[in-house]
Image (cartoon, rainbow, N blue to C red):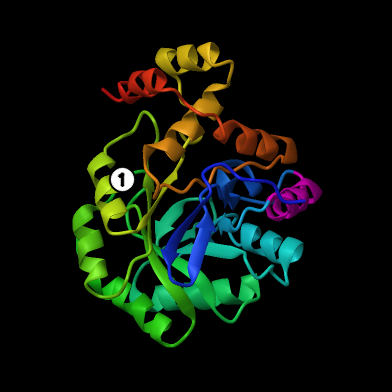
Amino acid sequence: MTTTLPGGTYRLADDLELTRFGYGAMQLAGPNVFGPARDHDEAIAVLRTVVELGVTHIDTADFYGPFLTNELIREALHPYPEQLTIVTKVGSVRGDDGAWIHANEPDQLRTQVHDNLERLGVDTLDVVNLRVGGFDSPEPGSIGERFAALADLQQQGLIRHLGLSTVSREQYDEARAIAPVVTVQNFYNIANRQDDAFVDLLAEHRVAYVPYFPLGGFTPLQSDVLASVADRLDATPMAVSLAWLLQRSPNVLLIPGTSSVAHLRENVAGAALDLPEDAVRELDAIAG
């Protein structure tokens, strides 16, 4: 049973329109995004509920688990609904101890694309994001050779659209000179606003901006102002944070994650909150 999702939809390309409220599959893996799901059956139920709610945007990566989230997505949803877009990432692998390791040489990227194709059970990946930087910030340097390797796979028909993750404005400019970029996924939320100008630039370019860790990451956002606004609106800080992001710019797409069906429904309901102008002004001041 589909429902009207907060934020409506956003068209990234002629053949790609996504619900602005999406779902990030990262939390389906174990602690620190490593190891098996805490509750396999609940993870499957979450993914199926995502589709039932009308969400058409699922974000994943083969290095979540590793491999686990893609395998769960395939188990829960394959064959995939026609309207569903699965966005995956390449550029990283996991060590035996769970460490996040850069793996973004062209040969490594090609291997990861083929691994994603196999585990998701598809012939073509809808969107592939090249992950460039570290945990929450870009790292300097050219990405031309790496992005060109993905652009070549796109020309071969293995990828429909290309995106970027954890990149600077300069790296985005370098990539878009090689092939069209439909989305940028960077660390951003109500308290971490270093990408404000970048969000606006991407809106001008009709490129989606997808903030990861929209609720602060593994440590939830803590702010007296946020708590005060939430209390005044009889809402949760989580709901206010998601609603603020949707109202920030029409090109912002959300991918909050959860491993609970109940929490998923709460996220959808909370993001529908309409923030009054005075609340937005207070919230805008959090980042200083």
Query: In terms of depth relative to the viewer, which is nearer, 180 or 59?
Result: 180
Residue 143 in sight here: no
Q: Which residues are magenta?
A: 39-53
Residue to which mark 1 is pinned: 137
Q: Amino acid at mark 1?
A: Ser
Instruction: State yes or no: residue 149 in magenta.
Output: no
Query: In terms of depth relative to the viewer, which is nearer, 219 or 66?
Result: 219
Can you give x and y, in whole percent of width and height, for residue 267 in the image? 61, 36
Give the residue displayed 50% in from the left and 62% down from the top.
17
Give the residue displayed 38% in from the left and 64% down from the top.
182
**How many numbered marks does the figure carry?**
1
Image quarter hosting the C terminus = top left
Name the secondary structure under disc 1.
loop
Can you give x and y, in whole percent of width and height, for residue 284 in the image? 33, 25
At label 1, counting other C-alpha atoms closer than 10 Å, the crowd grade (few under 14, some 14-19, many 20 or more) is some
Vertical relation: 95 (above or below) 152: above
Vertical relation: 59 (above or below) 266: below
Q: Quadrant of residue 268?
A: top right
- In-image side of 250 versus 125 (left or right): left
- In-image side of 105 versus 4 (left or right): left
Instruction: State yes or no: residue 42 in magenta.
Output: yes
Q: Quadrant of residue 13?
A: bottom left
Residue 179 in sight here: yes
